[in-house]
Amino acid sequence: MINVIGLGYIGLPTALMLASHGVEVVGTDYNSDLVATLNAGKTTFKEDGLDELFADAVKGGIKFSTEYQVTDTYIVSVPTPYDKFSKKVDACYVVAAIKSVMDVCPKGATVVVESTVSPGTIDKFVRPAIEANGFVIGKDIHLVHAPERIIPGNMVYELLHNNRTIGADDKAIGEKIKAVYASFCQGEIVVTDIRTAEMTKVVENTFRAVNIAFANELAKICRHDNMDVYEIIKICNMHPRVNILQPGPGVGGHCISVDPWFLVGDYPSLAKVIDESMKTNDGMPDFVLNRIYEIMKENGLTDISRVGLYGLSYKENVDDYRESPTLQLLESQERHLATGLKTYDPFITKDIVENQYHDLDAFLNDVDLVVVMVKHDEIKENMNKLSNKVVLDCHNICTLPNAYHL
């Protein structure tokens, strides 16, 4: 039996996937309300295919509990935030979970850390916590790092098809855990050492962050001299060895907007390109805010409460709003002692900010300037409703004559 610790955006789909493929699974989370919701037969967030996967997992016998289980294999999938000043990873949740595992696990149990961490985190924080509890690593407890590689909006498919990395002290233990993931994973599964596994996951997301930053910096340069960044990128990408991404209003989620900072925090004198790239991406919500004020002035708009931000999630067609550019923009506006922007997102059903709407037509009726922060399918399918609005399109999806762009 496998005890999956942490039933959030990564832990829950992982537990469901294992259970739906014949593995005995108990999912554990300290949040009793979340556990009660799952035990009532309901999922806790929206994701394509998740409800069907949940039904299959229930048929497979999955159980949910607030208690850690006595078993020989644990998968820890808890948050790994970072300190916003030092940029270093905060491993407190991982360490706390492993300490709780040690309270119940039998001798020789294997603990798999799925949470994304900076290279060396397991050496610096996890091993000392285990040894301080009197456990001998490699004998009383085995350590493995198997970082997740899925993205909200396509989780179920990517769990099945993406390649995986297993980092282990002991090759035999690594192969044992590889077999666990191979119960559902159709991609290639590589077994390596723990520190390499830690580094590869962070580097993957850092690569993406740096490339996004290049596109965002181009947008700022082109705006400064009134050039069309989208036309320029389109022409450049006709070159066989060039593939520039599209700029956007910022970077959110708990991967690209967070993981690269781990390298900046651990290697501040070396990670210069990464540092500047992250600052560029983090500066995009302020750039959008400045564009809003420029467009308001150009169109004679003076009432900030008649400006609406479309989209609160960090990417299209999901309800995940962690580190979302829209929330970053609202926080920036508040720091400048200004409030009043209206918001709406079809995927966010609970109130998470002030002036939040839950109906597109009501939202549009109360605004003159619409800022498209997220390119949900809904707004693409309802562009005609923006024809009498001023539009700031942050994703180059609107072809209306009244649309401005980054």
Image (tube, grey):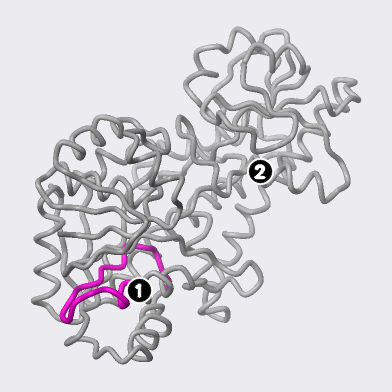
Query: Is label 1 or label 2 in front?
Result: 1
Relative to 353, 82 lies left or right: left
Pinpoint residue 332: horizontal percent, then vertical percent. Answer: 76, 48
Amino acid carrying mark 2 in the image: Leu
Residue with the mark numbered 1: 98
Query: Residue 249 is drawn in which quadrant?
Result: top right
Percent position of residue 173, x then y = 12, 75
Vertical placement of residue 268 versus 279, above or below: below
Classed neighbour count for the residue bearing mark 1: other residues with Cα under 10 Å, few (<14), some (14–19), many (≥20): many
Residue at 77% of width from left, 16% of height from top? 366
Q: Quadrant of the N terminus?
A: bottom left
Image coordinates of residue 263 in percent, x first then y, are 49, 72
Residue 115 is a magenta residue: yes
| Badge 1 or badge 2: first in the primary sequence | 1
Decide: is 211 above or below 260: above
Q: Is residue 206 left or right of residue 305?
A: left
- The numbered dot on residue 38 is none
Q: Are marks 1 and 2 in contact (CB under 8 Å)?
A: no
- For residue 327, the mark is 2
Describe residue 125's horizontal placement relative to residue 402 as left or right.
Answer: left
Which region shows up in magenta?
101-118
